[in-house]
C-alpha cells in the first residue's frame, strides 16, 4: 500500500477516461497497467429536435464528476492526493458530428453515432468513393448537412469527434488517433493519413457550393500510436479538475474511439483476431489479412490504433431495451414488497433464459430503440411478437429478448463468414457480459464461434486508452503495440472460453429466419406509429 501511495504521489501512474453512452469512466493504473482506482459518472443522451445528442455542459459536468469520484477513491484507498499523472488518454463513443467556427463556438448540437439521418449522404458517398460510408461517420453527417443546405455549413472551421473535442480542450491540440480518424473519413493505409484521393473527390463534389473551407483543412491531425499528442494545459487542468490540485504539463496519447480502445482492451489488434464490444450498442471488430472482395453497405472498414484494416459490424441497439424489461421486473418486485438488487434481477432472468427452447419458443422481438443502418431503418420501435401457438413463458420470453439483441449483428457477421473471414475466437467485453456465463454462451451460440471473456473485460475502453497512454511513455525502442500488449500487458492473463452448442446455434438460426422475415413489421411500425 505504501508503494502504491508513493507511485500515485510521484506521478508514476496513467489515467484513462472514456465517455461511454451511459457512463463516463476514469481508470487510474500503475505503469504496468494494473488498475489502482476507478471513478465514474452516469449520464444519458437526449433527443433534441429529433437528434440524439449530449450537451457540452453535460460533457464537462460528467468529466469533472468522474474525475472527482476517482480522486475520492484514490484518497480513500491510498490516502494520497492525485496531483501528478504520468500520462493521460481520452476515449469516447466513436463517429458523430461536432463542428465549430473560427471563434471555437459549437455550430449545431453534437450529432451522435446513434442517429440514422444521413441515408442520402451515405449512399451518395459510397458511390463516389467506392468505399463503405456508414450513416454514423462524420463525413456522412457533414455531407448530409451540405445536401440539406444547413445554414451553419459555410461557417465550419473545425470538425471532430467527441474524443477529439475533449482532447482539444484539454491540450489545445486538434488531434485524433488512427482508429478514431478512420470512423470520420477513410484512411490511406500506406500514408496512415486521411485518403487524399477521396478528399479530392469530395471537394470536387461540393465545388459549386462556394464554401470558404476545404475538407482537408477542417479535419483534425492524425497522430500515430505511441506518439505524443499534446500536453495538459493550465486551462485544461482546471477544466478537468476545478479544485486546482491537478498539475499541468501531463503528456497525452492520441485520443481514440471506443472501437480502438476495445481492441486494445481485448488484445485484438493482430490480423485474424477479433473482439465484440457489447453495451448500449454492439459492434464486432475483425482484423483482416486482406481487403474484402467488394463494398458492403453493412460493413464498416476502419483500422486498428496501429494501422491494420478492420471489418466492423456495428449495431446501434443492444442493451437499452433489455434494461427496460429488467426495470419493469424490478418495479414489480418493489410493488410486491421485495427488495432485490438490480444485478440480481439480471442474474435471475438471464439464468432463466438458459432454460428456454433453442429457438425461443416460436416468438420474435426487435430491440430497436433507435434506427439501424444494417437493416435500413432510420428509426426504431421496440416490440415483442408472438403467435397463439408460441410457448409463452418466462424462460422463452427472456431468451427471445436476448436473441433479439443479437439479431442485427448476426446479419453482418454472416456476410463476413461468406467472405471467408475467420477468427479462432472472439473476445467479448462490455456490460452485456457482466452476468457470468449466460450472455457469453448465447453470444457463442448466436455467432457460431467460441467467445472468450478475460478478467480485464469489465474495465473496458477506459482501461484500453490507459494502456495506450502507458505504451506512449513505457515502450522500448522499436517495440510495437502488438508486442507490448502480448508480452507485457496480457502475459499470463486469465480468461474463460465458451464453445458454441450445435443445437442452440440451430435454434438461433430458426429465430433468425423469423427475425429477417418480420423486418417489414418493424418498418411498418416506424411508419405508422409516430413519436411525440
Image (cartoon, rainbow, N blue to C red):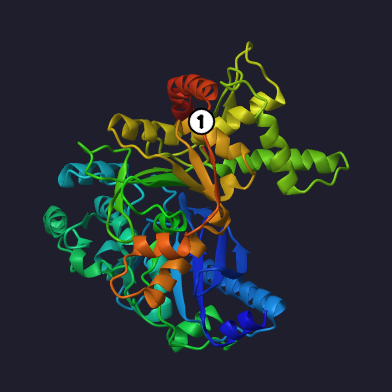
Residue 423 versus residue 170: which sits nearer the camera?
423
Per the image, the residue denoted by label 1 is 500
The secondary structure type at the circle numbered 1 is loop
Residue 187 image point, x, y percent: 23, 57
Total residue callouts: 1
Whether residue 168 is visible to the viewer of this picture, yes or no, is no
The residue positioned 32% from the left and 71% from the top of the image is: 175
Q: Is residue 279 left or right of residue 389?
A: left
Quarter of the figure that contains the C terminus: top right
Residue 277 versus residue 400: which sits nearer the camera?
277
Quarter of the figure that contains the N terminus: bottom right
Residue 190 image point, x, y percent: 16, 59
Label 1 crowd (10 A; few <14 / some 14-19 / many >=20): many
373 up-or-down from 217: above or below: above
List the single residue furthest toward the right. Answer: 337
Find residue 401 and report its image quarter. top right
List the single residue furthest toward the top. Answer: 389
209 up-or-down from 471: above or below: above
75 up-or-down from 92: above or below: below
Residue 12 versus residue 48: which sits nearer the camera?
12
Q: Is residue 109 left or right of residue 308?
A: right
Q: Is residue 67 left or right of residue 209?
A: right
The residue positioned 33% from the left and 56% from the top of the image is: 304
Residue 528 versus residue 254: which sits nearer the camera?
254
The residue positioned 61% from the left and 65% from the top of the image is: 41
363 up-or-down from 272: above or below: above
Whether residue 48 is visible to the viewer of this picture, yes or no, is yes
Residue 282 image point, x, y percent: 47, 44
Residue 386 image point, x, y percent: 60, 19
Amino acid at each position: 500500500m505504501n508503494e502504491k501511495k508513493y507511485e500515485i504521489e510521484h506521478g508514476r501512474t496513467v489515467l484513462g477516461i472514456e465517455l461511454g453512452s451511459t457512463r463516463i469512466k476514469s481508470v487510474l493504473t500503475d505503469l504496468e497497467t494494473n488498475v489502482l482506482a476507478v471513478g465514474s459518472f452516469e449520464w444519458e443522451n437526449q433527443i433534441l429536435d429529433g437528434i440524439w445528442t449530449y450537451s457540452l455542459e453535460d460533457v464537462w459536468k460528467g468529466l469533472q464528476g468522474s474525475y472527482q469520484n476517482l480522486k475520492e477513491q484514490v484518497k480513500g484507498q491510498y490516502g494520497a492526493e492525485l496531483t501528478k499523472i504520468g500520462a493521460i488518454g481520452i476515449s469516447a463513443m466513436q463517429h458523430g458530428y461536432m463542428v465549430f467556427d473560427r471563434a471555437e463556438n459549437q455550430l449545431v448540437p453534437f450529432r451522435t453515432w446513434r442517429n440514422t439521418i444521413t441515408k442520402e449522404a451515405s449512399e451518395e458517398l459510397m458511390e463516389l468513393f467506392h468505399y463503405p460510408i456508414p450513416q454514423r461517420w462524420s463525413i456522412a453527417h457533414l455531407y448530409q448537412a451540405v445536401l440539406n443546405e444547413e445554414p451553419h455549413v459555410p461557417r465550419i472551421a473545425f470538425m471532430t469527434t467527441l474524443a477529439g473535442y475533449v482532447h482539444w480542450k484539454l491540450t489545445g491540440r486538434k488531434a485524433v488517433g488512427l482508429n478514431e480518424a478512420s470512423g470520420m473519413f477513410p484512411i490511406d493505409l500506406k500514408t496512415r493519413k486521411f485518403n487524399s484521393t477521396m478528399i479530392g473527390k469530395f471537394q470536387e463534389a461540393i465545388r459549386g457550393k462556394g464554401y470558404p473551407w476545404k475538407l482537408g483543412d477542417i479535419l483534425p491531425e492524425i497522430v500515430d500510436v505511441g506518439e505524443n499528442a499534446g500536453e495538459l494545459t493550465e486551462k485544461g487542468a482546471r477544466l478537468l479538475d476545478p479544485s486546482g490540485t491537478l498539475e499541468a504539463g501531463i503528456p497525452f496519447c492520441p485520443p481514440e474511439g471506443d472501437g480502438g480502445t476495445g481492441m486494445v482492451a481485448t488484445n485484438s489488434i493482430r490480423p485474424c483476431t477479433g473482439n465484440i464490444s457489447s453495451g448500449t450498442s454492439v459492434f464486432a471488430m475483425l482484423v483482416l489479412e486482406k481487403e474484402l472482395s467488394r463494398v458492403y453497405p453493412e460493413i464498416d472498414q476502419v483500422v486498428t490504433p496501429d494501422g491494420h484494416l478492420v471489418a466492423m459490424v456495428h449495431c446501434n441497439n443492444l442493451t437499452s431495451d433489455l434494461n427496460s424489461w429488467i426495470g419493469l421486473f424490478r418495479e414489480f418486485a418493489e410493488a410486491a414488497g421485495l427488495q432485490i438488487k438490480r444485478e440480481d434481477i439480471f442474474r435471475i432472468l438471464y439464468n432463466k433464459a438458459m432454460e428456454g427452447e433453442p429457438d425461443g419458443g416460436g416468438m420474435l422481438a426487435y430491440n430497436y430503440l433507435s434506427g439501424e443502418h444494417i437493416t435500413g431503418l432510420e428509426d426504431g420501435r421496440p416490440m415483442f411478437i408472438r403467435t397463439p401457438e408460441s410457448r409463452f413463458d418466462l424462460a422463452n420470453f427472456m431468451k427471445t429478448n436476448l436473441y433479439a439483441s443479437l439479431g442485427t449483428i448476426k446479419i453482418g457477421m454472416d456476410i463476413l463468414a461468406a467472405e471467408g473471414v475467420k477468427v479462432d475466437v472472439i473476445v467479448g467485453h462490455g456490460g452485456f457480459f457482466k452476468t457470468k456465463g449466460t450472455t457469453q454462451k448465447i453470444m457463442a451460440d448466436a455467432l457460431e464461434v467460441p467467445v472468450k471473456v478475460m478478467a480485464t473485460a469489465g474495465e473496458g475502453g477506459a482501461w484500453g486508452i490507459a494502456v495506450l497512454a502507458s505504451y506512449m511513455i513505457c515502450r522500448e525502442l522499436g517495440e510495437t503495440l502488438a508486442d507490448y500488449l502480448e508480452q507485457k500487458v496480457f502475459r499470463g492473463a486469465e480468461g474463460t472460453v465458451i464453445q458454441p452448442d450445435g443445437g442452440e446455434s440451430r435454434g438461433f438460426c430458426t429465430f433468425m429466419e423469423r427475425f429477417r422475415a418480420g423486418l417489414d413489421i418493424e418498418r411498418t411500425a416506424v411508419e405508422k406509429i409516430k413519436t411525440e
